[in-house]
Amino acid sequence: MQQRRLGDRKVGAIGFGAMSFGGMFGATDAATSLACLDAAAEAGIGHFDTANIYGMGVSEQIIGRWGRRDVHLATKCGIVNGPPRAVRNDEPHIRQCLEESLRRLNREHVELYYIHRRQPDIPVEDLAGTMAKLVQEGKIGGYGLSEVAPQTLRRAHAEHPVTAVQSEFSLWTRLPQLGLIQACRALGVAFVAFSPLGRGMFGRAPLKRDFRAGIDFRDTNPRFVEPNFSANLAAIAPFRDLCARRGWTVPGAALAWVLAQGDHIIPIPGTRSADHLRDWQLPKIDAADLAEIDRILPPGFAHGDRYGDHQMAFVERYC
């Protein structure tokens, strides 16, 4: 697998998002998750991403059981599940969450530690100062920010260099191209694209609307409710046809498109099954292919917002 820089080391250009290990998209079990992690490492994936709220610690516990020390590992804190849902960026809370995560991960150090969402009433310079202390203490290798505006990144980076920024980015979510991806490139910061496969919409087969109510948040997500869901399936169908004609897998082509948007971009698709990793094989695509994909799926084609209003509460908006 091709390599891309993440902080002070290079990792596989495709990382792995472990959100689904917490059961947030469907039933899973430890044995299946561990087998998936093994298969991902064998495929050349070297960066694994989790968070303290994925299954309320379950995802971190699975990775801790896995016990690999030769991979680049990221986890996150900042979101406090409610009700009501809240965000905390104060130093005592960050330190407590980090210690709890390290115990679950069976580690004394994590390579990358994200602030999952920013608390608006804490200056980002103070937040960066807290993260700098954790770097100096050897608790973390570097820090990241998630779902922030370009100006927040610049302010934090001026206080202490940011390793990575993580935001949703895919064929149907392109907001980061309106400033954030460019700011990361200018500062030498990795851009980590989560949900690069549209939470299953760009999977091997058209998604069925059989989400578990109260567990799978897609059940109430604007893009996955009718009439938006059927409209999105119809809009993506020509892209599926293109992939079939070219001999590409749909997930592989979607990931190749993301990677083509910048050499500092690292997508982190997720899965609960080792079998799905085969679909992530990247086709060779050229400028003509990219133009055809953009013709079929132009910016803004998606029906519905990517989050419901309650989930947008702590996402920084800049356009």
Image (cartoon, grey):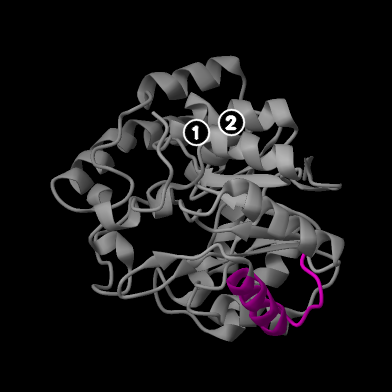
What's the magenta region?
Answer: 92-110
Q: Is residue 292 above or below residue 262?
A: above
Residue closest to the eye, 73 or 153: 153
Labels 1 and 2 touching (C-beta < 8 A): yes
Side of 33 relative to 141 (left or right): left
- Whether residue 248 is visible to the viewer of this picture, yes or no, is no
Q: How far across and how far down the image is residue 114, in percent?
A: 63, 58
Q: Amino acid at mark 2?
A: Ile
Q: Residues within 10 Å of mark 1 (few under 14, many from 20)?
A: many
Instruction: Verify whether residue 304 appears in magenta.
Output: no
Residue designated by label 1 = 176
Sequence order check, earlier mark of 1 and 2: 1
- Specify the label residue 92 is tagged with: none
Label 2, secondary structure: give it: helix
Label 1, secondary structure: give it: helix
Q: Which corner quadrant holds the N terminus?
A: top right
Q: How far across and how far down the image is residue 65, in percent?
A: 70, 84
The structure residue drawn at horizontal position 80% and vertical position 74%, both measured from the top left corner, is 68
Instruction: Verify whether residue 109 appears in magenta.
Output: yes
Residue designated by label 2 = 181
The structure residue drawn at horizontal position 58% and vertical position 73%, both measured from the top left corner, is 93
Q: Which corner quadrant holds the C terminus?
A: top left
CA–CA distance in space, label 1 to label 2: 6 Å
Residue closest to the eye, 308 or 20: 308
Q: How far across and how far down the image is residue 312, in percent?
A: 34, 50
Side of 210 relative to 282 (left or right): left
